[in-house]
Amino acid sequence: MKKVCLIGCGDHAHHVYLDAMLRCRAEMEQIVFSACCDVEKERARNFAEKIHAPYFYTNYFEMVARERPDAVILVTPYHLTAKIAMDVMHAGCAVLIEKPPAEDYSSCRALADVAKETGCMNQVAFNRRHIPVIREMRRHIGNTAIQHISYHMYRIGRTESYFYSTAVHGVDLVCSMMRSPCKKGEMLYGALPGYGTGVENILMQLLFMDGGTAQLSFCPVSGCVSEGLTVTTDQGSYIAEIPIWSDQDTSRLLFSNHNGEVTQITSSDGPHMFETNGFYWQLRQFLENLLQGKKSPDDLFSVLETMRLTDCIRLRQAHYMA
Ligand SMILES: NC(=O)c1ccc[n+]([C@@H]2O[C@H](COP(=O)([O-])OP(=O)(O)OC[C@H]3O[C@@H](n4cnc5c(N)ncnc54)[C@H](O)[C@@H]3O)[C@@H](O)[C@H]2O)c1
């Protein structure tokens, strides 16, 4: 039996984690969601009721001391996440950390060092890695060499100054698919002054150590919500559309071989947003690893390159060198 608690009962916890937790609870009888915590008492009470947890708290130190959980799910505002994750690991708990795990590369590095020092199992919640079409594409690619990835993220009205904390998803998806570290990168920023200061289209071009390349475009005020990637391999190209925040499963995966013959590849964890967007599988993998005492392949060390590259966007840098 493993005891799991959650910290941060806000929007993301309600719209995503709740359903994923309920499904995992039904499927994994050795997992007990014993308590949750939010500084806003009513949110904590409400979430505890919905996940059928007997206890709720407004202070996470108190919750961890009393409940002594095996693991904690962290769904807190990203500027607080690294500090809370450190406290939780110092208390000896495994931790599932919402993205981004820290505000910048250096605080993520410090967090990874705490994970190493405490030996706590940890996983960063970059849900793109767990989306069914992405998992299926990875399975089909196997060990075949990846020549190039072209990735796009289009959004509507995303004029916030911290858009990099959403763009980090695309950087992580590309880095986690490539087989070798990034050697160098060039970034271009196309200012969109009509939409506000600092609002811009971002273009990244990356070269990896094994000769693979990637191009990523981020258009925060494009007028459409669309995200996808084409992965060119020695077998041919995989073209994936990723479902974003919708119960309508808009995901699609096509494979086109070197003769131009196209086949459609299907995959599904279920019809709901928390399933199509990879959130169910992400939680399930974390809980499986917890039960089996295994290290997560999606741990803090696996996201350090993502965080370094995302720092370039955050700081509006034009060049990246390994
Ligand atoms: N993977 C995704 O696509 C995705 C999407 C949305 C949000 N997120 C991430 O989820 C996290 C939470 O986002 P959100 O939209 O739910 O924010 P939110 O503000 O709605 O919720 C955060 C909650 O944490 C609580 N909180 C703050 N400090 C706390 C503390 N010290 N102890 C306990 N509770 C505390 C707040 O009261 C709030 O209820 C962020 O890290 C965000 O980046 C990820």
Image (cartoon, helix red, strand yellow):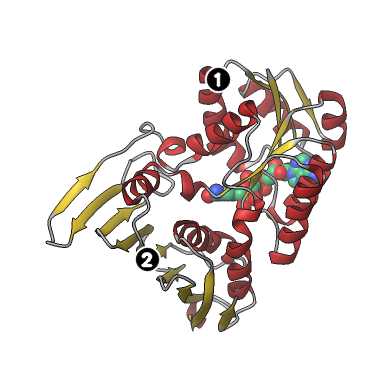
At horizontal 71% and vertical 32% (from top left) the residue drawn is 71
Q: Which quadrant is home to the N terminus?
A: top right
Secondary structure of the residue carrying tag 1 is loop
Let me know if residue 100 appears in the view: no
Q: Secondary structure at mark 2?
A: strand
Marks 1 and 2: in contact by CB < 8 Å? no
Q: Amino acid at mark 2?
A: Ile
Badge number at residue 111: none
Q: Residue at x 53, y 75 (%)?
A: 183
Residue 187 visible in image: yes
Judging by the rendered image, the residue that carries numbered circle 1 is 28
Nearer to us in this view, 55 or 224? 55
Q: Position of residue 217 (x, y in %)?
A: 42, 71
| Up/down of 69 relative to 279, above or below | above
Q: Is residue 17 left or right of residue 251?
A: right
**Where is residue 177 shown, x and y percent of the image?**
44, 57
Which is more toward the observer, 289 or 14?
289
Q: Is 123 on the left-hand or right-hand side of 282? A: right
Point out residue 167 in the picture as x, y percentages from the top left corner.
52, 63
Quadrant housing the C terminus: bottom right
Location of residue 35 (image quadrant): top right
Q: Give the side of residue 70 with respect to residue 31, left or right.
A: right
Residue at 43% x, 38% y: name it: 273
Residue 95, compared with residue 319, is above or below; it is above
Give how far apart the Cα atoms at labels 2 and 1 are. Answer: 36 Å
User: Can you say whether 133 is above or below 106 in the image?
Assistant: above
Q: Which mark is residue 149?
A: 2
Q: Residue at x 52, y 70 (%)?
A: 182
Mark 2 Cα shell of 10 Å, populated few (<14), some (14-19), many (≥20): many
Amino acid type of the residue that numbered disc 1 sits on in the rendered structure: Met
Marked residue nearer the N-terminal end (2 or 1): 1
Q: Position of residue 14 (x, y in %)?
A: 59, 35
